[in-house]
Image (cartoon, helix red, strand yellow):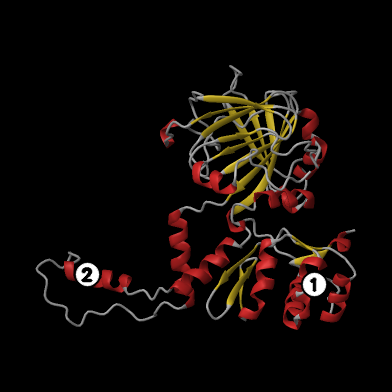
């Protein structure tokens, strides 16, 4: 199922990044040849009934004259009986972060290693019967749309979209008018890349599954707010505003230029270092957006027992509830796991890079690194904390 390179024949990662990434759409025929969906429509419906799994149902009533609401959004978990009551067409069921529950889909993310891991957000799956759609809309993040079952017609437009272009009064950001500039029909294994800001409208041409590989694109205002909160919690000064040079003002209701100048000086004096930014950002981008967290192993292993299992050939997997990233510094390497930070000795750098680069670990890849007791202890600790697991643990 997994292709190591979903780009068109002859296209390098460098060329894709230079000419397409966040610049223009790209249709990739047979990106994943002979793709077989690991999920059926029935399994997706079952997931939508489970607590803790984010699911949505979108009904398209735009063609019904007697409908006051052209589009209707409902959030799960849903009652199983609902699915026997749905019409035969014009609806879509969506499941977020489906790769957390289906390990083979997490492997699919390995095909997108030409994009930094921290930028990957999740895989969403959507099921639609014929004419199912979520409406013409625009996203502010990059997305690869992989056809997993059936066929779907995608129409796109690069025209600029403003809030005034949206249908008012909806819980969905659907365009009131959509004039397509390009159109394609995607079959199983085909994939469409869309950069941010490109309007798109997908309509199922029969029973259809689409896997959407989306990328994190935090709003700049959210980044700034988060960083200021981090500084305030970590080490901003607690001293108070002072003005010993205060002079008499003609208008006591006025905020004087001198006061504004002093406030600006306080803001400009914030003690921001490159290390502050590195530590904050690594923690932010490895946090789970849904608040999920791993559970420690019920029977923790000591280092010797852990290494013994690994050396016997058991495959070690990353838990998809945990995001991994690292930053190389002169005197240490920072390891970020699920929003937590650990400053490690530079001697562990090769092990940390391998941990953060790969989702699946084999003893062959780690054989030389296992000669280090510190590397073994790090792996064992992450295993006992639940961030890693042996494949047989879930068997």
Q: Nearer the viewer, residue 354 or 117?
A: 354
Left or right: where 137 falls relative to 228: right
Element class at badge 2 = helix
Q: Quadrant of residue 385?
A: bottom right
Left or right: where 262 falls relative to 116: left
Q: Which residue is mark 1?
A: 367
Q: Which mark is residue 386?
A: none
Q: Residue 216: x, y in percent?
A: 56, 52
From where the camera sits, is residue 309 visible?
Answer: yes
Q: Residue 138: x, y in percent?
A: 52, 36
Q: Nearer the viewer, residue 190 or 335?
A: 190
Q: Quadrant of residue 191?
A: top right
| The residue positioned farthest toward the front in the image shown | 10
Element class at badge 1 = loop
Write the residue at 73% across / 27% down. 129
Q: Residue 30: x, y in percent?
A: 70, 34
Q: Which mark is residue 261?
A: 2
Examine the rendered structure and indicate whether residue 20 appears above or below residue 312: above
Q: Residue 246: x, y in percent?
A: 16, 78
Quadrant containing the C terminus in the rendered view = bottom right
Q: Nearer the viewer, residue 335 or 62?
A: 335
Q: Nearer the viewer, residue 130 or 333?
A: 333
Quadrant containing the N terminus in the rendered view = top right
Examine the rendered structure and indicate whether residue 277 appears above or below residue 213: below
Please give the count of numbered marks on the rendered protein: 2
Write the residue at 54% across / 44% down. 15
Q: Rounded to the nearest whole Å, what is the CA distance between mark 2 and mark 1?
A: 60 Å
Local packing at callout 2 (Cα closer than 10 Å; few below 14, some 14-19, many 20+) is few
């Amino acid at each position: 199922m997994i292709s190591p390179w979903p780009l068109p024949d002859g296209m390098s990662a460098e060329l894709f990044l230079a000419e397409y990434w966040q610049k223009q759409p790209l249709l990739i025929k047979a990106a994943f040849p002979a793709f077989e969906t690991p999920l059926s429509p029935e399994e997706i419906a079952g997931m939508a009934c489970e607590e803790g799994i984010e699911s949505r149902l979108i009904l398209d009533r735009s063609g019904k004259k007697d409908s006051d609401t052209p589009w209707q959004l409902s959030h799960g978990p849903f009652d199983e009986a609902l699915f026997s009551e749905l019409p035969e067409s014009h609806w879509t069921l969506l499941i977020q972060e489906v790769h957390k529950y289906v390990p083979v889909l997490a492997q699919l993310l390995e095909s997108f290693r030409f994009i930094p891991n921290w930028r990957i957000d999740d895989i969403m799956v959507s099921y639609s019967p014929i004419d199912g759609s979520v409406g013409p809309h625009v996203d502010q993040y990059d997305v690869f749309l992989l056809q997993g079952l059936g066929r779907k017609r995608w129409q796109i437009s690069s025209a600029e979209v403003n809030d005034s272009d949206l249908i008012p009064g909806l819980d969905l950001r659907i365009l009131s008018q959509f004039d397509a500039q390009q159109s394609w029909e995607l079959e199983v294994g085909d994939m469409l890349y869309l950069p941010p800001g490109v309007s798109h409208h997908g309509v199922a041409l029969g029973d259809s599954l689409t896997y959407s590989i989306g990328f994190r694109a935090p709003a700049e205002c959210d980044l700034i707010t988060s960083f200021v909160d981090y500084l305030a919690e970590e080490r901003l000064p607690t001293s108070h505003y002072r003005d010993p040079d205060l002079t008499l003002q003609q208008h006591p209701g006025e905020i004087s230029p001198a006061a504004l100048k002093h406030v600006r000086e306080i803001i400009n004096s914030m003690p921001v270092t490159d290390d502050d930014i590195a530590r904050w950002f690594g923690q932010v981008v490895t946090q789970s957006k849904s608040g999920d967290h791993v559970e420690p192993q019920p029977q923790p292993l000591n280092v010797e027992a852990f290494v013994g299992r690994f050396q016997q050939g058991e495959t070690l997997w990353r838990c998809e509830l945990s995001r991994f990233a690292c930053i190389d510094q002169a005197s240490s390497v920072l390891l970020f796991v699920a929003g937590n930070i650990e400053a490690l000795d530079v001697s562990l750098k090769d092990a940390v890079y391998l941990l953060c680069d790969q989702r699946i670990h084999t003893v062959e890849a780690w054989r030389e690194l296992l000669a280090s007791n510190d590397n073994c202890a790090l792996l064992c600790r992450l295993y006992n904390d639940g961030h890693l697991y042996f494949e047989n643990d879930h068997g």
